[in-house]
Image: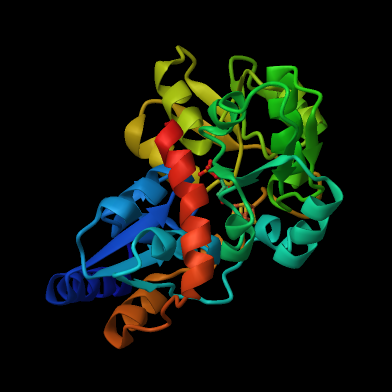
Amino acid sequence: MVENPNNETLARRIAGLKREKRAVILAHYYTRPEVQGIADFLGDSLALSVKARETDADIILFAGVRFMAETAKVLSPDRKVLLPVPEADCSLAASCDAADLALFKAAHPGCRVVSYVNTSVGVKALTDICCTSSNALDVVRSIPADEPIIFAPDRNLGAYISRLTGRDNMILWGGACHVHEEFSAEGALEMRRSHPGARIVVHPECRREMVDIADYVGSTAGILEYCGRCGADEFIVATEPGIITEMQRRYPDKSFIPAPSSDASKRCCECEYMKMVTLENICRTLEEESPEIVLDEDVRRAAERSILNMIAIK
Ligand code: 13P
Ligand code: SF4
């Protein structure tokens, strides 16, 4: 949806550049509405990883954060992969450093390493199987029950999967996403008192107190699908509120309210990194074909193996 006239001009310019340069734009659900509006593919982390692998475009522009663009480059090494804002990082990816993970692995020999796709390419290179929130349960279940697992970096997702599988041999890395950790269960329950029919939907990166009050727990794609099939008309949404653009587009007769932050000074929990991507910087990036993601080939190959192991499971 392109609303202001400047955005319309930029969207036309971007469409022209995409045709001229055989470029494709992949965008995550957390990006700004006008960025979602010009994307060729909009999706969750898993769907976008698969699209990055399948595309035959010459250029992939990733409207999202660094780890997503790196994943696209790992899977499509012959394409030029562009990231409009190189500083658009991710607090969860930043919570696990490759050198620290190497030491951790050495301290826990014999473990299989499962890492969330929200990690640097260096961490993926040290990983046996990647996962996303859509397939983490299947990935962990694919590993024999008696094999210990190092699960990195999200402690909340790891604890949730450990409870679902009943596995007590998952060693959890202590990382977290600052956006999802900020939701308040007390605030969400208070909100539901004034919207008694509303369902609370929660991303598994949230803290246990949120998971415990949820009517549904799932990835962004899972939450979208649940809101469609569930008979309720109102939803309190405990994940980054950018997803509400897609919820409203798919289900215009339902209403979606961002779950409150535990920080009383904030209306909701937004990912500032995802919001750094704008039509202006997308347009400039396509014009200049820069900034580009460049990876060391040995690290790329090692990371690719862990992502392909994940894709093979789904
Ligand atoms: P999914 O798209 O896998 O649900 O991930 C959520 C997220 O935090 C991406 O940064
Ligand atoms: Fe990273 Fe959290 Fe932002 Fe997703 S929402 S990109 S996990 S900081």
Q: How many marks?
A: 0
Residue 11 rendering spot, x and y as whole percentages: 25, 69
Instruction: State left or right for residue 64 relative to residue 87.
Output: left
Where is residue 199, by image quadrant?
top right
Q: Residue furthest top?
A: 231
Instruction: State left or right for residue 211 relative to residue 71.
Output: right
The residue located at (60%, 63%) in the rendering is: 120
Note whether residue 68 is visible: yes
Residue 187 drawn above or below residue 41: above
The residue located at (54%, 26%) in the rendering is: 138
The residue located at (40%, 22%) in the rendering is: 228
Location of the N terminus by quadrant is bottom left
Q: Nearer the viewer, residue 45 or 53?
A: 53
Location of the C terminus by quadrant is top left
- Specify the quarter for ligand 2: bottom right
Residue 163 drawn above or below residue 313: above
Q: Nearer the viewer, residue 60 or 74?
A: 74
Residue 179 rendering spot, x and y as whole percentages: 69, 51
Instruction: State left or right for residue 260 relative to residue 18.
Output: right
Note whether residue 64 is visible: no
Residue 312 rendering spot, x and y as whole percentages: 41, 36
Residue 14 rendering spot, x and y as whole percentages: 24, 72
Instruction: State left or right for residue 310 relative to residue 113.
Output: left
